[in-house]
Image (tube, rainbow, N blue to C red):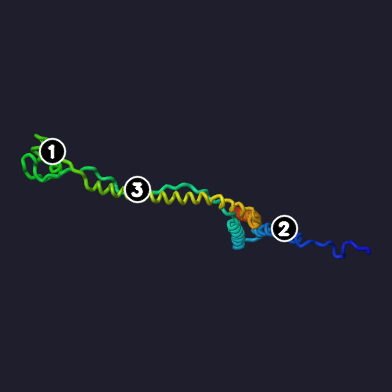
């Protein structure tokens, strides 16, 4: 039996995928050329229409800028880094020793009124003859400060130990997280997302170019209007 392989009367058949790709390409070029007539329209329009044209171009650019931002690839996971624990606040170190105050002169026994004389333990008359007779004792506040510093150092050591454990765990998990990120970048949804982002960036560039063109045309028409 003979089979007729001639072309049907209505023309060659077109596969749905080819028709879809051609229609997508046509729609893409239509979108790219969309702002063109709108931006060129200031040549023939005036007044509030020019402002509307600029607003439309700006909105066009903003829409595709938002779309490009939403289609960004996920960032590469950060490699774990060691962290140092901070020590809690500890007040300034007090003096190791403090002077022993005297209320009476240790030489003549007269009462002392000024703090300098109490620290020197002699009065103004005896100090010129015998010199200061200071005495010192251990500062109890310094011992309290040592306890506070020891507690703060223990807290910092415990925190540093916890951070080291977290770092070891994160370092062990990082290769798997990085491989998952690479697999996601190579997946079909990621490839499609990058393709859509490139188209959105192209539309954004066209919108910005037409916006600049519209502003230049507005400025040109304004300059020409002033010289008429």
Circle 3 Cα neighbour tier, 10 Å, few/some/many (<14 / 14–19 / ≥20): some
Give the CA separation, mark 1 to mark 3: 39 Å
Give the spatial CA distance, label 2 vs label 3.
67 Å
Residue 213 locus on image (x, y percent): 63, 53
According to the picture, the residue beneath numbered tag 2 turns out to be: 25
The part of the image, by quadrant, that contains residue 2 is bottom right
Does any portion of residue 122 appear in the rendered image? Answer: yes
Res 133 label: 1
First-in-chain label (1 vs 3): 1
Q: Nearer the viewer, residue 227 or 111?
A: 111
Q: How many marks?
A: 3
User: Residue at 74% of width from left, 61% of height from top?
Assistant: 20
Residue drawn at the location 12% of the way across and 35% of the way down = 131
- First of labels 1, 2 by sequence position: 2
Looking at this view, is 62 or 112 the one in front? 112
Quadrant in the picture for the C terminus: bottom right
Mark number displayed over residue 123: none
**Residue at image location 39% in from the left, 50% down from the top:** 158
* Kind of element beneath mark 2: helix
Q: Quadrant of residue 65?
A: bottom right
x then y, percent, for residue 214: 62, 56
In whole angstroms, how far apart are the C-alphas of marks 1 and 2?
101 Å
Quadrant containing the N terminus in the rendered view: bottom right
User: In this view of the protein, can residue 224 be seen by the observer?
Assistant: no
């Amino acid at each position: 039996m003979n089979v007729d392989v001639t072309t049907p009367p209505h023309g060659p058949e077109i596969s749905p995928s080819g028709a879809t790709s051609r229609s997508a390409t046509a729609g893409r070029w239509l979108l790219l050329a969309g702002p063109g007539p709108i931006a060129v329209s200031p040549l023939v329009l005036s007044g509030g229409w020019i402002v509307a044209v600029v607003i439309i171009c700006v909105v066009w650019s903003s829409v595709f800028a938002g779309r490009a931002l939403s289609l960004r690839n996920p960032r590469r996971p950060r490699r774990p880094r060691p962290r140092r624990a901070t020590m809690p606040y500890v007040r300034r170190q007090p003096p190791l020793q403090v002077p022993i105050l005297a209320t009476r002169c240790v030489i003549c026994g007269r009462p002392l009124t000024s703090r300098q004389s109490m620290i020197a333990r002699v009065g103004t008359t005896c100090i010129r003859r015998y010199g200061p007779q200071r005495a010192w004792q251990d500062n109890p506040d310094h011992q309290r400060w040592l306890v506070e510093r020891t507690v703060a150092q223990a807290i910092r050591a415990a925190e540093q130990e916890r951070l080291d454990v977290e770092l070891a765990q994160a370092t062990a998990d990082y290769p798997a997280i990085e491989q998952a990120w690479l697999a996601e970048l190579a997946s079909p949804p990621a490839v499609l997302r990058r393709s859509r982002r490139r188209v959105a960036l192209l539309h954004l560039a066209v919108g910005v170019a037409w916006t600049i063109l519209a502003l230049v045309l507005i400025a040109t028409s304004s300059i020409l209007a002033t010289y008429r």
